[in-house]
Amino acid sequence: MGDRFGYLQKAINLLFENVGTIKGISSIYETPAMGFDGESFLNCAVWITTEMNASQILTSVLAIEIKMGRERTTSGVYTSRPIDIDILFIDETVLDSPDLIVPHPRIGQRKFVLQPMFDLNPKFIHPVSNKSVAKHLEETLDNSPILKQDQRMVNPMKKFDISRYNYIAIEGNIGAGKTSLATKIADDFNAKLILERFKDNPFLPKFYDDAARYAFPLEMSFLADRYQQLVDDTTQLDLFKESVVADYDVNKSLIFAGITLPEEEYALYKKLFQMMHKDLPKPDLYIYLYQNTERLLENIKKRGREYEQSIQGEYLQKLNAGYLEFIKNQHSDNIRMVDISERDFVKNRSDYLSVLNEILN
């Protein structure tokens, strides 16, 4: 009812804000009302990736319908409505509960569902029938007319333009969430992901037990590994990825060494760093995630790496000061400092979108 194209776009925007990333939107099709006499319907299908479970998706979808003015009745009679959002599939999940049946039980009987889904993924296999969407469309007995519309919906992801950055580095203190943010951005924007290989470093647990003894071999091994990884991963062309996103920048080597090494060792380390650093590409966008020390300690405790549990707040404060000093001395417009002390972009989608807005707009 009403501004039909406007309602479709608003629903897509709200799904993006509340459920997950929009990977694809079909064409729009007009079809006659089914099950009652009324005005024709506009239909489209949306392909979403989400970290929600089925119950959470349903709760969000129903809330969006209510927000957009839909009033549900218990009469069982079909009527016109401003918006109707159906959950068709959740990957290969098969679910039959009083609140939700997945896959939607009437998919094979509805051309206005099958045709938009065909646009998005004709080879998708129905987990119950074991037939593709294309096969269901071919076999459906629904012969009602279906008219493709010229107007298309806009993907809300388009307001976040990552294409202008070939190489993004995300930095922050220990426990700030660098890897989580880098992974989410890489997944959402089809970027090549580079994750620091700290788990493979044999000196890291030893360093937390005896910093004075193991600081130099630790920093040297990290320097060599980061250098080799960035040379390999930032210079190899990936035709299927639009950008590179890393959860560290090579300059962290110098920042950490400045705190952990005595003066003479640091001077030697800095010479080696400068010799190697000149061969590495510089990030087009450098993001620093700031979290207060209390939150950092909570995050470190929560993720449970045994060798990190002895980290003290004083050490984290020194690292933060080192990062801020580094950032202060850079002359670049492509540095973003984002305070995430009061945000949880892993569990709260609105926080994640606010971080994206801050760094990409």
Image (spheres, rainbow, N blue to C red):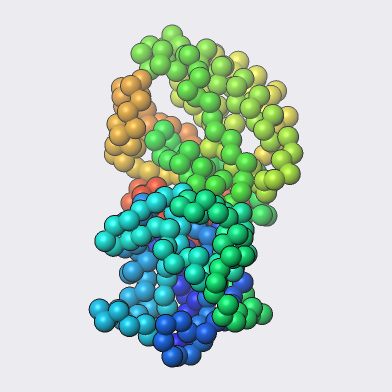
Instruction: Determine the residue positioned at 59% across, 39% down.
Output: 193
Nearer-the-camera pick, 236 or 83: 83
Residue shown at 29%/31% (left/top)? 301
Q: In which quarter of the image is the C terminus?
A: bottom right
Please provide percent x and percent y for residue 178.
Answer: 47, 40
Between 327 and 96, the one lying in front of the other is 96
Note whether 34 is above or below 208 in the view shown: below
User: Residue 331 at what x, y percent from top left?
Assistant: 63, 46
Q: Which of 40 and 234 is in front in this view?
A: 40
- Residue 41 vertical placement versus 312 (above, below): below
Residue 216 position within the rendered picture, expressed as x and y whole percent measured from the top left: 51, 13
Location of residue 117 (image quadrant): bottom right
Residue drawn at x 54%, y 33% as measured from the top left: 195
How many marks overall?
0
Considering the image in quadrants, where does the N terminus appear?
bottom left
Task: Tell me if I can see residue 350 in this picture.
Answer: no
Q: Nearer the viewer, residue 136 or 178?
A: 136
Q: Is residue 39 visible?
A: yes
Is 73 situated left or right of 198 in this image? Answer: left
Give the side of residue 26 with respect to residue 297, left or right. right
Is 114 drawn above or below residue 150 in the view shown? above
Image: 180 above or below 3? above
